Amino acid sequence: MLGEIAITRPTGRVITSGSILMADFLQRIAERRDVEAFRKLFQNYAPRVKSYMMRQGADANTAEELAQETMLTVWRKAALYSGEKGSATTWIYTIARNLRIDRLRRELMWVALPEGHNEEPSTDALPDDLLSEQQRKIRVQQALIGLPPDQLEVVTLSYIEGLSHSEIAERLGLPLGTVKSRMRLAYQKIRELVEDLK
Amino acid sequence: MMAIKHHPAAENLMSCSAGSMPDAFAAVMASHIVMCPQCRDDLTFLETVGAVLFETLNATPVTSSAPVLDLRADEQYRGEAEVSATVGGDVPAPLAVVIGHHFDAVAWHAVNPALSEYLINLPSAQFAVPRSQLRLLKVAANQSLPQSARSGSELTLVVRGSCSDAAGQYYPGDIAEFSNASEHAPIAGADGCICLVATDSKPNFSGETAGPLQSMNGA
């Protein structure tokens, strides 16, 4: 079933996400300011945004505040979400990530970039070549599951723990060059698997 | 502007999309991204990677409930600023937030007749761990770019003029990851060169130390 994807992560956990349902909630907020839809989104995403912020180093209170603020931003900016352009989860994740860069890292220059900085996608991709975001996400999930553990590890430390290349090197006791090449290999594998779809 | 030919390495795009780069490196990436539609596409792709990993997180119970929304105040964002490379000057938009819009108005510090430097004090510096440094280097025509004698990462964006090394020519918008071990220092073009350089430790660019600047007049 397309709307329900269950994958088993290397950690053994099973994840379910009703992506299409969530996208529909977002559309309802955008079109009708639907408070009930917002509550549903909040229940689904706020606890995970809180986890994300805590993994990135925020204490529980700060993480809770940032989760609240992420969801308020979702409410305010719902009109900017376009179901054709991306999944609800990817859109909300990007908002949470940007808020974290702003609040936990105070990176003025990054924050100066508009959200969804891909407003003008390259024109050489014809509509037929464009994967549906849903297909792409499934492929990325598969690619991540298929990565060798040492590659998945550096990617996870980067995205979830918020560690830089040199911090990852220090954490794992590896040369900087090894961290970089593992990440590069991971990127190539994910990219290849997704390109296969075209 | 010429088409951008030199892009950041995959591991830098990945860290950038994760929001996990030291601030100076993120600043170089942000300045490149506003000029480079290809890398904007790449980052969009990589956000899916972040989102998939984000979905695997366990939920942490949220003690407060959904915020009470003021239904009367229907203040929705309808649009956002377009991505624009520069606004009313020659400095890339994200960088202009920190140093102003014109490279010529920057308070350059002359290191020697062929090299000026401007250390950029990032507002995030006091929060940033690990430390990184961001600076502008202005190199006179046909002179070598200083090479830092240290290990660690370095990320360079050409913002004005041009330079070249064994790997090719770099024009505004091009990213260069000059290898410290490189035998031949990159050399500024006929119009000189201004680069934005991020380093993850204090580089040895200063004229007093042995190494990089000795090669300025051709070793």
Image (cartoon, coloured by chain):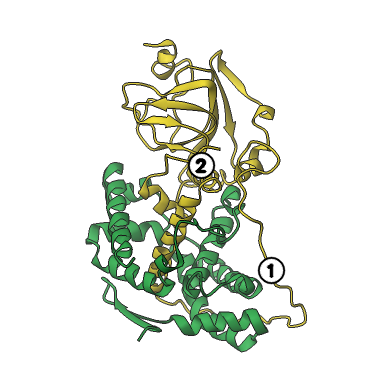
Task: Please determine whether, in this image, residue B77 is positioned above or below residue A169.
Answer: below
Question: Is residue B69 toward the left or the right of residue A43 in the image?
Answer: right
Chain B: drawing colour: yellow
Residue at image x 42%, y 64%? Answer: B50
CB-based contact (under 8 Å), mark 1 and mark 2: no
Q: Residue furthest left?
A: A148
Q: Tell me residue B100's x, y (percent).
A: 68, 38
Q: Residue A93 at what x, y percent from top left?
A: 49, 68
Q: Residue A122: which disc?
A: none
Give the numbered dot on residue B28.
2
Q: Secondary structure at mark 2?
A: helix
Q: Residue at x 46, y 26 (%)?
A: B163
The kind of residue on which mark 2 rests is: Val
Residue at mark 1: chain: B
Residue type at mark 1 is Tyr
Asked if residue A57 is positioned above or below residue A78 in the image, the reply reads above
Residue that badge 1 annotates: B77
B75 and A71: which one is in front?
B75
Q: Which residue is at a point 70% across and 72% down the rendered structure image?
A: B76
